[in-house]
Amino acid sequence: MTEIKTIHVYVALCDNANQGIAPVPEKLGNGQNPIYNLYWGAGYGVKTYFHNSNDWNVIKVSKNVDLLILERILYKHKTSNTYMLADAYDGAQIAQTTIDFLEASAGRNGFQIDYDGELLCFGGDANLLSYIGHNALMNFEVTGAFTPASTNKIETIILACYSKYYFSKKLKETGAYPLLWTSHLMAPEAYTLKYAIDGWIKKEDNYAVAERAAQAYHQYQGCRINTARELLVTGF
């Protein structure tokens, strides 16, 4: 049987009231309502984009998982044995979202979901982790258990403004590897994540994955391809 691979995506819902962002329309920026949120239920949000993808099946949708996670979705890739868990965090809890992502990057807080007789590993036991949303580290410091809990080299994708600059020190502390992150301001929308994951599933090298992400950003944002390549980078 093909080896199971797992991806865990931490989405900090866009929140006009609780995040240091340039305000977006009220419906898109309500961090307590995933349905229309810019990073979740809007057209290029994680939920909508992956729901509409021809490459992924929706396995299960869970609402109000706990006080932090307002919605959780389990996806199965159609042509590989890859599963993705996407968590929509209350936008007011962006600091905890960041902490949870970084602690998982250190191999901590792993858990399993039983699906169809298989135990799927997420949190710090996943193979690939991603953070999507506003870069909370631009506004405040976070602390947590960021030292590595294992020797596993977890790969990460951090789609937030200036994520390489702001996350570098803490990510080095966790021992994780930055498969993809950003050098400048960006729109953390789901097409960039999807195209990068496409390459990761195919076991392409990190530069090929970054190129896929740049091509997606170029296509959807209408920016120059060289600008997208300078924005979406890999490695320390």
Image (cartoon, helix red, strand yellow):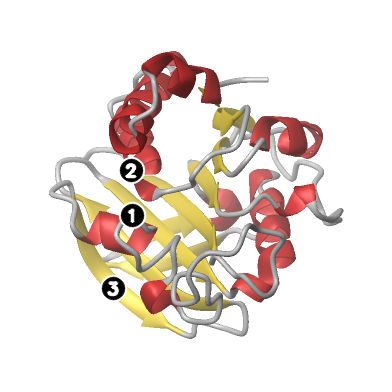
At which x and y percent is residue 119? 38, 61
Left/right of residue 191 with respect to residue 80 in the rendered view: right
Q: Nearer the viewer, mark 3 or mark 2?
A: 2
Q: CA distance from mark 3 to mark 2?
A: 21 Å
- The residue nearer to you, when weighing 125 against 26, is 26
Residue marked by disc 1:
44
Label 3 crowd bin: few (<14), some (14–19), many (20+), radius 10 Å: few
Residue marked by disc 2:
191
Q: Nearer the viewer, mark 1 or mark 3?
A: 1
Q: Secondary structure at mark 1?
A: loop
At which x and y percent is residue 9? 48, 54
Quick check: marks 1 and 2 in contact, CB under 8 Å? Answer: yes
In which quadrant of the rendered image does the C terminus lie? top right
Q: Relative to 184, does residue 37 appear above or below in the rendering? A: below
Residue 83: mark in rendering: none
Q: How many marks?
A: 3
At which x and y percent is residue 227? 47, 20
Type of the residue with mark 3:
Lys
Whether residue 108 appears in this view of the structure is no
At which x and y percent is residue 54? 13, 49
Q: Secondary structure at mark 2?
A: helix
The residue under the point 33% across, 44% down is 4
Label 1 crowd bin: few (<14), some (14–19), many (20+), radius 10 Å: many
- The residue nearer to you, when weighing 123 against 95, is 95
Type of the residue with mark 1:
Tyr
Residue marked by disc 3:
60
